[in-house]
Amino acid sequence: MPHETKSSFQDRLAVSAMPPPGPAYFNARRALWWIPTQDTPRPADPSPARQRLEQMLSKEGAEEDDLIWSAGVERVWQGLTGGAVLKKRLPLNIVVKLLLAGWIRDGTWPRGKVAPEPDDELLEVDQS
């Protein structure tokens, strides 16, 4: 069996006194997740391709715009959903917009619908 290394999150989780399963457990685990690590990589300067992708997806309604989809978003979405490994990291907000654009095209997400706001319980998490 190959040696598996644990992430710093897993290390913190293993030594933390956690409440029983439920909302308090979720909140405690989430608080551990948000603790920055010493080895967090410094984000690279965005490439011209990423800047273009971010610019396209920053427009209002970009996820539903067929011109934006055809201008390169489709190709990136196909790579992500096809299992391709990204050469450089993408911000989570860009990945979410890419996925939403693809879900609209494949019928997973209905056009014109907006995700509901999160439960109040999630908003009460203390991030101090």
Image (cartoon, grey):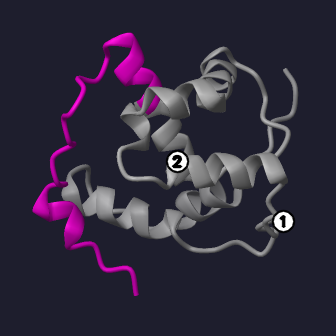
Q: Is 19 in the magenta?
A: no
Q: Nearer the viewer, residue 95 or 35?
A: 95
Q: Nearer the viewer, residue 85 or 107?
A: 107
Residue 126 in picture, x, y percent from top left: 31, 80
Q: Amino acid at mark 2?
A: Leu
- Image quadrant occupied by the C terminus: bottom left
Splitting the image into 4 quarters, where does residue 55 fall? bottom right
Give the residue displayed 65% in from the left and 46% down from the top.
53
Q: Is residue 16 visible?
A: yes
Disc on res. 45: 1
Q: Marks 2 and 1, Cα distance to the nearest angstrom?
A: 18 Å
On screen, residue 59 above or below 105: below
Secondary structure beneath dot 2 equals: helix
Q: Nearer the viewer, residue 23 or 88?
A: 88
Residue 82 in picture, x, y percent from top left: 66, 14
Give the residue displayed 67% in from the left and 28% down from the top.
76
Q: Main secondary structure of the magenta part?
A: loop
Comparing marks 2 and 1, which lies closer to the viewer? 2
Whether residue 97 sits left or right of residue 112 in the image: it is right
Splitting the image into 4 quarters, where does residue 2 fall? top right
The segment highlighted magenta reads: 101-128
